[in-house]
Amino acid sequence: MKLRIAPITVLALGLCAALLLTSARPGHAVCLETGQVAPDFTIGDIDGNPVTLSQLRGKVVLLAFWASWCPRCMEEMAFLQGLYTGFSGELEVLAINQETQNLSATHVAKLKEEIQGLGIEFPILLDKELEVWKSYCINALPTSVILDKEGVVRFVEPNYYWASQKKIKAVLEELGVNKP
């Protein structure tokens, strides 16, 4: 039995591969490095309010790149809510949603429902044009980035696995974020 692959499928796979190869350094799922100042951005939250990263200077910020269809992302979101609540005011968490390009109002409403169901209280940002994703060269979900109070990258980790929680907590402790 011969396998037939449509030319459009080959083209689509080629474009995906090209995007992955050109958007980050080889062998890396993100182009940020510890010690560099994080690129600034302004994008809307799930309610349409603008959020600017540089306005959070003076606080430790955790950027969580995620999508609702990603099971590990949803695990990380629950963990991050615990941190956000536990570190009252010392830590800002911004969850930057990946699936927002050309989102319908129905899908945004579904996202809001899922977020409320999880008890998420930190801001959910909708990167509709994928500008932040491109400037941070995100190629894996979830990806966590921790910035110090000056906006300098102190931690970058693509994916979320059994050791991620311990690593994130250790970096926050190093940055002086303490539970009340």
Image (cartoon, grey):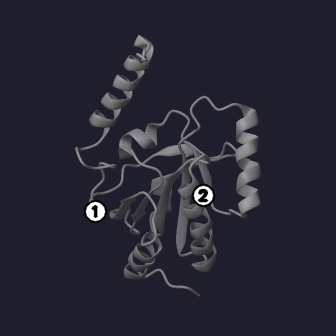
Report the front residue among 157 and 33: 157
Query: In the image, 63: left or right of 115?
Result: left
**Three-letter code for the amino acid on which mark 1 is drawn:** Thr
How far across and down, in percent of the image, does residue 165 sit? 47, 73
- For the residue labelled by badge 1, is the local secondary structure a helix, a strand or a loop? loop
Q: Quadrant of the C terminus?
A: bottom right
Image position, residue 64 (x, y; %): 50, 57
User: Would you place residue 172 above or below residue 56 in this image?
Assistant: below
Count up the numbered dots: 2
> On residue 74, which mark appears?
2
Quadrant hosting residue 119: bottom right
Q: Residues within 10 Å of mark 2 (few under 14, many from 20)?
A: some
Q: Which residue is mark 1?
A: 34
Observer-nearest of 1 and 92: 1
Residue 83 percent across, percent down from the top left: 57, 74
The label shown at residue 64 is none
Classify 10 Å Cα crowding around label 1: few (below 14), some (14-19), many (20 and above): some
Residue 73 falls left or right of residue 26: right
Q: Are marks 1 and 2 in contact (CB under 8 Å)?
A: no
Horizontally, residue 178 falls left or right of residue 155, namely right
Residue 52 point in image, percent of width and height: 51, 50
The three-letter amino acid code for the residue at tag 2 is Met
For residue 106, above or below residue 56: above
| Viewer-side residue, 55 vs 33 | 33
Q: Is residue 85 above or below residue 161?
A: below
Name above or below for residue 161 compared with residue 38.
Answer: below
Q: Secondary structure at mark 2?
A: helix
Q: Residue at x 42, y 82 (%)?
A: 173
Please give left or right for residue 166 compared with residue 126 in the image. Answer: left
Report, in whole angstroms, how far the alpha carbon at label 1 lies from the one at label 2: 25 Å
